[in-house]
Image (cartoon, grey):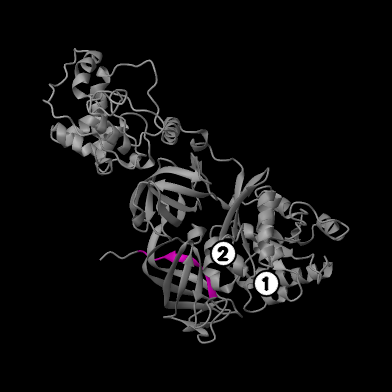
Amino acid sequence: MADQKKPGLNPNASSFTFNPVASSWAPPAPVQQPQPPPPVPEVPAATQIEQTIPAIIPKTEDITKAVASVDIGDGEEEDDEIDENDPLWKATLEMANGNREEALRLLEDPDSLMKHPQIIAALALDGPKQEDSWEDLEAEAEQKVEVEVEEEAPSVPVEPDPPTPSPAPFGEAGELEVKEDEMDGEAPPSTAVIEADPREHLNIVFIGHVDAGKSTLSGQILYTTGFVDKRTIEKYEREAKERNRESWFLAFIMDTNEEERQKGKTVEVGRAHFETVNKRYTILDAPGHKSYVPNMIAGAAQADVGILVISARRGEFETGFEKGGQTREHALLAKTLGVVKLIVVINKMDDPTVEWQKERYDECVTKLKPFLRTCGYAVKRDVCFIPISGLQGANIKDEVLSSDCDWWGPLVAAGEHNNHQTTLLGTLDALEISEHRKADAPLVMPVLDRYYERGTVVMGKVEQGTVRGGMDIMIMPTKHRAKVDSVYINDQPVKVAKPGENVKVRVNIGAEELHKGFVLCSAASPCKAATSFVCQIALVETLPERPIYTAGYPCMLHIHTAETECTCVKLISVVDKKTGKKKKQPHAIKGSVLECRLAVSQSICVEAYETTPQLGRFTLRDSGKEQGITIGIGKILKVDEHKKK
């Protein structure tokens, strides 16, 4: 008799609990009986239960089969009736076109049932979202759920006790998601739009010959300023020791991919941030190998200040500075790409071949000064020289010990080589470049990259003007109009970004409408777009197989973030070295200064150098047979207007 009274599943229960953890489920075979009339709202649920229980108690063997086929979890099922207002039952009955037997049959296969969006939507009515995938319901199902909730809200009685929780793992996840949803209602402080940091921001690019110590110096700065913790450094030390490269551990901070760590060569431009009391900085660690000069150009185009890293080790300085070394090419490119201040750090002064000798420092400085003048730098005003040890950290944040280098302090006190600070960070904090930034000019922001993440996000540096959320912009050279939805600095939303800031801008236009080399401009005053322009070029190098520059000469043009093929369509004049006067000449050779007209196949964003220097200076490179070289640097004198047909 006890077995006959054992409770089982009731197909007419007042509520239905669906357990997604169960691997299978099947209700007991329904007892053949007349279809009950629809429930009358005025009749209490307790009276209905008393009237229907005697007629629906299943047999003992049915109960045993049902209990064996159902995963009941940790709790016990209760005998209840089917609630005609239950969302799951209503959805299933609707799918069965009102046929109750068909609805019960559908409930026997929950896996197939869960493929229907109306079932998922119905389950979502009973509480919070239980799985992440449920957030992606179809729009129609979501709208239907909202309508059903509004219609059923008055008829649902308010229970004083909380609902019975689901099994532990599923219930805990559901409760966690409820808290996350509640938090989404109020934006956390970290995502609130704030005013940008008032401290000046500088973009620093580390350039120089391969193996000069650029990545090690970058990592040392981040470690010294506290932006890399001790535990991370210890991890990199172990990894470097396993590779038998103990001195590379600081470089691993910037060189993050396996290829760079295996070969010890930077390939992509590394990017990191640090700050001092006075300023904020973005580090751009450029590759030093000649195979990756295009990547170096992309990094230097974003920079305001260049740190030219020179190795003082015997033989390494000479290798980098002689013909074919990257010391010369990087210094030349940096000036052309807009680096207004240059700090030359003589690295590896602690090397056994140097040991902080003043003679070696003076030798490097003496050879570098004349060359930097030919690159266009005002050495006495815009260039300074600092001896350092990137591996030991000497003269980076703290001054080198006088016991190791007794001549550095007196040299700084005398102001030699334009030195007024004893350390690298002190020199950076003392730099003033605000005169080169125009906040009140029309917006100019070359596109460095773009991607899609809940909208189109554009990456770039604000060259001039300001960008703020809600402003109207024009995308050149396509002349598409767009609107700025939000502006981010270091992934923090800000109200406005000033010149010199590396930003991410969310715009209301498709990602396919933007490409690297495009420019975000003020809608009222966009920049020019052209396929040809008149320019002045200094021919600094030529290929052995192509020693002269003439009309028809093809090469690669690098201007701001754009890179495209160009051709000299007309050689206008060549400056005579002896008299300084212009003369017509059909060709030019290495060392010449000339005027010519360059043409490209598609429109690019350019401006005359006198009006907008950021869009008016460029570099010419020729790939050649073996290795690409920089053949010339130039500035735009006049932009050709499009002729209307």
Q: Residue furthest left?
A: 34
Q: Which residues are magenta?
A: 630-641
Most common secondary structure along the magenta stretch: strand
3D distance between C-alphas at marks 1 and 2? 36 Å
**SS label for mark 2:** helix
| 218 with respect to 139 (left or right) | right
Q: Is residue 507 visible?
A: yes
Residue 372, picture quadrant = bottom right
Above-or-below relation of 11 to 340: above
Residue 19, picture quadrant = top left
- Point out the frontmost of discs 1 and 2: 2
| 299 with respect to 599 (left or right) | right
Give the percent coordinates (x, y) of residue 470.
40, 40
**Residue nearest the observer in this picture, 490 or 87:** 87
Q: Quadrant of the N terminus?
A: top left
**SS label for mark 1:** helix
Give the percent coordinates (x, y) of residue 2.
32, 23
Residue for point 67% across, 44% down:
278
Crowding around mark 2 (Cα neighbors within 10 Å: few <14, some 14 to 19, many 20+) is few
Mark linked to residue 258: 2
632 falls in the magenta region: yes
| 433 with respect to 101 (left or right) | right
> For the residue marked with disc 1, what is the amino acid?
Phe
Give the percent coordinates (x, y) of residue 475.
38, 53
Residue on which the image places disc 1: 371
Above-or-below relation of 566 to 473: below
Above-or-below relation of 510 to 49: below
Q: Quadrant of the C terminus?
A: bottom left
Q: Residue furthest front?
A: 1
> For the residue marked with disc 2, what is the amino acid?
Glu
